[in-house]
């Protein structure tokens, strides 16, 4: 088979300067050279992916400026700073901060109202304590000699101290306060900053959204980011294999997706935030433990969003058994609810009352390490303000909030709560005090020099694709005019919400046919002066006699309203033969895969045992 003129994915994914990296034939040889896709998604702290380690990866940002240059944008009128000190990381980048008077400090203003965590590395000198303020009134004291947390106050959610070796400690406070300054104090003792002399060492301050301190990002005159950054393609490894995640814009209407104690109604439950390692790989999962109140309901509610008549709502949450095996998830009590068994990863019960919700469904998916993502979906009958309810229990029942006497220690771990106004859930959108919206993914690439003026072939290998409620959203090649001239896949509702293959020339559809099952589908579209043929999963799918006249100039991944998980894309600058197209799109790569998947038996004089060796010799 001819070598593709453009290759994207197929197990080999890369990025460069935030752009998606593909490979194309060189101008003077058949060797492949890098080609960069211009990727767009906008300023986007809401996008996540599953990385190659199987963990949820977020956008991260150190909101502080000059995070380890404390004599610049930091205010320090009441203290003396000396640079060039030995640091926790073996460098000479640490600082000594000495008191000149009572309440000596350094501070910096910032602009952010989210749930946030302030962290700094510190070491005792003549003083053994440090106090840090992540927001006005939210203070934590830390013993730098014994490594313990002292007094905390204000709106502190959590405070931690962790050894960094050599007498150094990383101290952190998480806060829900909305004021905009951080302060570092050399402290004289627990809850005491009244002394007028003494010093400690400090290094590497960080302020970030969320409940925990993550790996340090050094900032300068501007803030610094990491993880899933603005306009960066999301190579997603859900299921262990890399694919390009392309999703429409979605909003998580839940305002606190991780800070469960910030929800507005907790009845007969105790919640401990930062209690366990979450699917993100950090200590920010919450533990829900029912109280021992006799025969009572144990529920958590969060309100503040609406449901709309005729519109679907998708509710999702990550959960893990922690003494109790059953999670109850519902929209507004018993109007729409499901029960999930976290011991075996099954849905025990799903129901709607038919008055408020119809067309209901529930699912549960393992994400590793005992964690599951539980989903509950329903179409609203009425338009009204709504709320999400969570219950946990030792048994499974067909009511949305069972009453029982708990043991006071057993519970369920939860993380990443999400509610979307759509018929299926998308990747996790974290929120830290307000609802947040992930912008749509999109990419373009000029293919003028990669395709013949007379013929070519496109190949798509989908991991999955889902449709949405709008039209004309495409994945393929065209002349830059939208869909006036286009070969590729569409993700829309032309076929009652289907994903399909589309050939549109001179603003007219020549082919527009739904793919019966887009999950793991392989599609080839070959075009030439003789016309267009499409192939799906090893079979010819559709054809048109209209000639291709050389108008394709760009490759577009436009998923404003669709959802595509793409394993591989290939562009050939010639029309493959029918056999090559069949081989390329075959769902099986070996005889053994074919026999196993299709449950075949063979009746051949030379094949008596159905062995792979005999099959290959026929």
Image: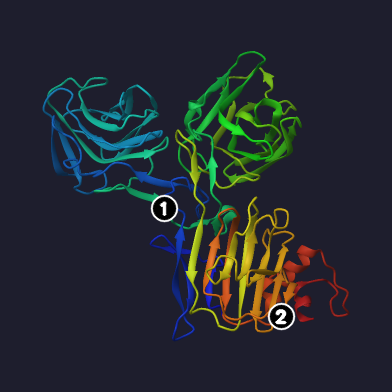
**Where the N terminus falls, by quadrant?**
bottom right
Q: Which residue is mark 2?
A: 578
Mark 2 or mark 1, earlier in chain: 1
Quick check: 137 left or right of 58? left
Quick check: 614 left or right of 117? right
Quick check: 50 left or right of 351? left
**Where the C terminus falls, by quadrant?**
bottom right
**Is any atom of residue 327 visible in this view?**
no
Q: Which mark is residue 151?
A: none
Secondary structure at badge 1 equals loop
Q: How far is disc 2 from disc 1 in space, using C-alphas?
A: 42 Å
Tell me residue 538's x, y (percent).
73, 71
Tell me residue 245's x, y (percent).
55, 56
Looking at the rendering, which quadrant does residue 243 occupy? bottom right
**Is any atom of residue 617 visible in this view?**
yes
Report crowding for label 1: few under 14, some 14 to 19, many 20 or more residues within 10 A (C-alpha): some
Question: Which residue: 57% across, 56% down?
Answer: 240
Snapshot colouring: rainbow
């Amino acid at each position: 088979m001819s070598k593709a003129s453009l290759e994207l994915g197929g197990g080999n994914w890369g990025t460069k300067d935030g752009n998606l990296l593909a490979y194309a034939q060189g101008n003077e040889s058949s060797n492949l050279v890098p080609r960069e896709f211009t990727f767009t998604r906008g300023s986007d702290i809401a996008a996540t992916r599953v990385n190659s380690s199987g963990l949820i990866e977020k956008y991260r940002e150190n909101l502080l400026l000059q995070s380890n240059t404390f004599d610049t944008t930091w205010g320090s009128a009441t203290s003396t700073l000396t640079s060039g000190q030995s640091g926790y990381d073996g460098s000479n980048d640490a600082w000594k901060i000495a008191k000149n008077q009572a309440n000596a400090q350094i501070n910096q203003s910032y602009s952010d109202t989210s749930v946030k965590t302030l962290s700094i590395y510190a070491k005792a000198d003549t003083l053994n304590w440090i106090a840090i303020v992540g927001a006005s009134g939210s203070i934590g004291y830390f013993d730098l000699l014994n490594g313990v947390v002292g007094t905390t106050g204000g709106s502190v959610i959590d405070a931690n101290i962790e050894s960094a070796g050599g007498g150094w400690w990383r101290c952190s406070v998480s806060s829900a306060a909305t004021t905009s300054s951080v302060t570092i104090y050399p402290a004289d003792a627990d809850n005491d900053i009244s002394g007028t002399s003494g010093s400690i060492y400090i290094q590497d301050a960080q302020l970030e959204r969320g409940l925990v301190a993550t790996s340090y990002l050094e900032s300068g005159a501007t803030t610094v980011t990491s993880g899933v950054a603005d306009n960066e393609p999301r190579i997603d490894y859900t299921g262990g294999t890399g694919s390009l995640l392309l999703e429409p814009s979605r909003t998580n209407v839940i305002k606190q997706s991780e800070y469960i104690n910030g929800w507005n109604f907790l009845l007969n439950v105790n919640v401990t935030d930062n209690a366990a390692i979450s699917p993100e790989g950090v200590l920010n999962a919450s533990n829900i433990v029912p109280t021992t109140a006799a025969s009572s309901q144990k529920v958590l509610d969060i309100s503040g969003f609406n449901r709309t008549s005729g519109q679907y709502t998708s509710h999702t949450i990550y959960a893990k058994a922690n003494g109790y095996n059953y999670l109850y998830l519902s929209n507004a009590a018993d109007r729409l609810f499901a029960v999930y068994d976290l011991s075996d990863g099954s849905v025990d019960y799903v129901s709607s009352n038919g008055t408020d919700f119809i067309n209901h469904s529930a699912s549960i998916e393992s994400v590793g390490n005992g964690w599951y993502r539980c989903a509950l979906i329903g179409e609203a009958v009425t338009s009204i303000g709504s709320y999400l309810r969570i219950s946990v229990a030792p048994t499974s029942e067909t009511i949305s909030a069972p009453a029982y006497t708990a043991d006071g220690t057993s519970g369920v771990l939860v993380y990443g709560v999400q509610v979307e106004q759509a018929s299926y859930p998308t990747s996790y959108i974290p929120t830290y005090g307000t609802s947040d919206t992930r912008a749509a993914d999109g990419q373009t690439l000029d293919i003028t020099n990669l395709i013949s003026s007379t013929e070519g072939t496109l190949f798509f290998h989908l991991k999955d694709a889902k449709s949405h409620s709008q039209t004309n959203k495409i994945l393929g090649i065209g002349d830059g005019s939208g869909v006036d001239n286009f070969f590729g896949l569409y993700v829309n509702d032309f076929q009652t919400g289907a994903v399909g293959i589309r050939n549109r020339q001179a603003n007219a559809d020549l082919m527009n046919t739904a793919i019966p099952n887009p999950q793991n589908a392989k599609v080839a579209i070959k075009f030439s002066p003789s016309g267009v043929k499409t192939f799906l999963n090893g079979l010819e799918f559709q054809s048109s006699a209209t000639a291709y006249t050389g108008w394709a100039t760009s490759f577009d991944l436009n998923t404003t309203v669709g959802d595509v998980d793409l394993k591989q894309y290939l562009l050939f600058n010639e029309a493959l033969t029918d056999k090559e197209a069949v081989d390329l799109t075959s769902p099986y790569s070996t005889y053994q895969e074919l026999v196993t998947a299709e449950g075949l038996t063979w009746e051949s004089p030379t094949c008596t045992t159905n062995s792979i060796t005999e099959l290959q010799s026929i």
